[in-house]
Image (cartoon, rainbow, N blue to C red):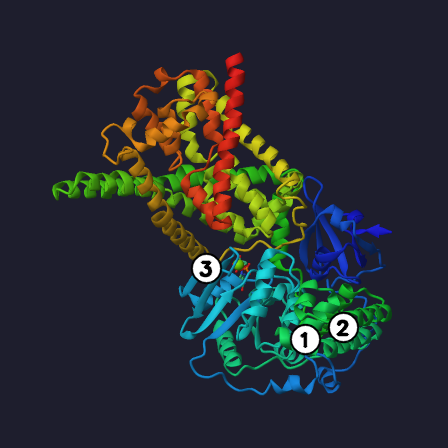
Amino acid sequence: METLKNLEIGKSAVISKVGGTGALRQHFLDMGMIPGVKVTMMKHAPMGDPLEIRVFNYELTLRKEEAAQIEIEYKEKPSDSGADFSYSTAEKETSTASNDLLTSHPGLGEDGKYHEKETETPLPAGTILTYALVGNQNCGKTTLFNQLTGSNQHVGNFPGVTIDRKDGAIIGHPETLVTDLPGIYSMSPFTSEEIVSRNFVLKEKPKAILNILDASAIERSLYLTMQLLELDIPMVIALNMMDELTGNGGSININEMENLLGVPVVPISALKNEGVNELVQHAIHIAHFQEKPVPQDFCSKDEAGGAIHRAIHAVIHLIQDHAERAEIPVRFAASKIIEGDKIILNMLDLDFNEIEMLEHIVVQMEKESGLDRSAAIAKMRYSFINKICGKTVKKPHESKEHLRSEKIDKILTGKWTAIPAFILIMTTVFLLTFNVLGAALQGLLENGIDFVTNLAATGLKNAGVNEVLQSLVIDGIFKGVGSVLSFLPIIVVMFFFLSMLEDSGYIARVAFVMDRLLRKIGLSGRSIVPLLIGFGCTVPAVMSTRTLPSERDRRMTILLTPFMSCSAKLPIYAFFVSAFFPKHGGLIMGGLYFLGIVSGILVALLFKKTLFKGEAVPFVMELPNYRLPGKKNVAQLLWEKSKDFLQRAFTVIFIGTIIIWFLQSFNLRFQLVADSQQSILASIAGILEPVFRPIGLGNWKIITSLISGFIAKESVVSTMEILFGDVSAAINSLTAASLLVFSLLYTPCIAAISAVRRELGTGWAAGVALWQCALAWILAFAVHFIGSLV
Ligand code: GDP
Ligand code: MG
């Protein structure tokens, strides 16, 4: 028995059986890996795993152990049109679409009651026309959304989960509301984002669906469409990337496709803003008049198709009343529970007898069709798609974009060049962000903030305002918020580069190249990006974990970002290294970064065994062609990130700085103190002294400095200098060593903690702060203890 794992690079074969179980198997099927489909092995990642394969005409990644579950056979001549099913009858079939419609069929169920609802009455004037924007990942959803809504958008979270939810009215149509959903490949939830998208469509009941298709990956796009059609919600299809398709000599017979699918199809190019107006007209029409899809029979007329057809019929009758009660479209519910979807099955709340009957129907269907339940449904969908594409799509020749991508990939994912290229690209991004562009902008902004601060200071002084209030405004608010605000340029520049890398398709390649390494610590390739950003600043690092496909990976990655020593700690290292270890500067700096990474890896291994048992998500991911990111997308993203950051600066951080100012300026009897030694902060530091004594830092001045580092790491050194006068005379090198290690690992600054809080909630945020302090203490203790022995 041959499996996909052993397919040689450059060779093709036909899938004969898809092994495995549960959601992962369903995901394979949903991604188009179904029996009868041709696969080609494209390449192995530089470290030998994962693999890159081609199905239909797009590239997927998957790991060797997953590939080992897919059986293949070598056929004489797998044809070159990616969509090569060896369907015996689908092709022989001569009946036309109109012929199909004459037969009674379960396209949408043929029950009279069901069809009654389809009489079209326009929605009353003033109803908000809500749309769900649904499509695969990278099919151009965000680009289209930005074209449709312009700047009318607002960002929020989906109820109960922290995944970005973007809503907005279509330009010129204030009565509309479009929601950009996370990209999905099917209505079987696989990742947490997919659950969000499915629940949105099922539970929030949008008035219509805007289904966006990638014309250059039409088969896989239509796979999702087929499931959306079952929902019996008014729908319009936006056939995106038409510029690429036609540019490469392909074409699509739009009218014929509309006939076959029973919904309006509009060819567009979201990037070039072509066809979008027509799309809007259709979208408004179908939503206003509640025009539902025209029922279609998805089943082929061969033996297997017939068996599936009968099973769907039987199940529809069986569950109709339950589906109505649960408010799930019955046709959708039927194919989902035949597929084996436990969530939908539970929602239907069937009787024991009914479940038993359902299982009998499925077993009989499996017997007659020769396919198991999920494969049968997937095959039904893909053979219908095959039929549609055969009639309407003229495949383009090998696309320019793909050829170009292959060339770029020769270097960026090449066996010997991938890792050097990665290091080069990341170094460039970091240098530009932290040394050149970001730093320059940050300098400018700091000057601006200083200027405003001074202006305010003199203003307050001249106006003769109470001194305490002056101190609050200047030393508290302006200094605290100002120091955090000055990070804005760095964050914006970082996100600019990141979004360029992400939108162009490079990040997917990095994940592909790095997967093997990260897998060893229980993560998948995609986590590499946030971790790298963590060396710059933990705040954007934590924010960027949103792109990760699984909640488990996302949590674990967030918890690991603090181990990547952020750039604000550099001043601390630089100061102590030059004062105490000038001869071994580079060694110690490098050592600290290394220590951070090693502790991160150890902690990840610990997490893997305890908090985050289980496997990182399987790595079935699409490798899209390299594309130039749209200007609007980038601009929109930068605007969002800045807004988000500013909001935080003026809420959480604002309050935090006031609290610290208060603690620093008053004593326990709430009298203003001149010398901060009498302040509450110093008293707290005094209480903490016994805790810090075993690690050699039992001095209230050091402790106060570390506490001020919680506001911003840079201020550790400045506070220490103010309190000590001459630091190098006051402490010895052992204390310095212990302090360095402690600074490396102890709690991230308040900005980072509040970013964690936003992503994971208050409990986790507090947990991170305490946990990092505990770890820092243990390592600093080790350093101090060993140091004292030597
Ligand atoms: P999403 O993942 O579905 O939100 O997709 P995006 O909107 O981020 O788009 C993915 C990539 O495809 C980006 O690089 C876009 O610039 C590009 N893109 C989007 N629409 C079109 C289009 O109509 N034509 C072309 N050539 N590229 C497009
Ligand atoms: Mg998007």
Above or below, comparing residue 482 to residue 228 in the picture:
above
Q: Outermost residue toward the top?
A: 790
Depth check: give the residue in front, 566 or 710.
710
Please tell me in which quadrant of the rendered image residue 460 appears: top left
Say which amino acid is labelled 3: Gly
Identify the mark at residue 322; answer none if there is no mark: 1
Asked whether the viewer can see residue 201, the reply is: yes
Which label was assigned to residue 156? 3
The residue positioned 84% from the left and 51% from the top of the image is 2
Dot 2 alpha-carbon crowd within 10 angstroms: few under 14, some 14 to 19, many 20 or more: some
Q: Is residue 240 visible?
A: no
Q: Give the CA separation, mark 3 to mark 2.
A: 41 Å
Question: Is 216 in front, or is 355?
Answer: 355
Q: Which residue is mark 2?
A: 354
Left or right relative to 657: residue 193: right
Tag 3's secondary structure? strand
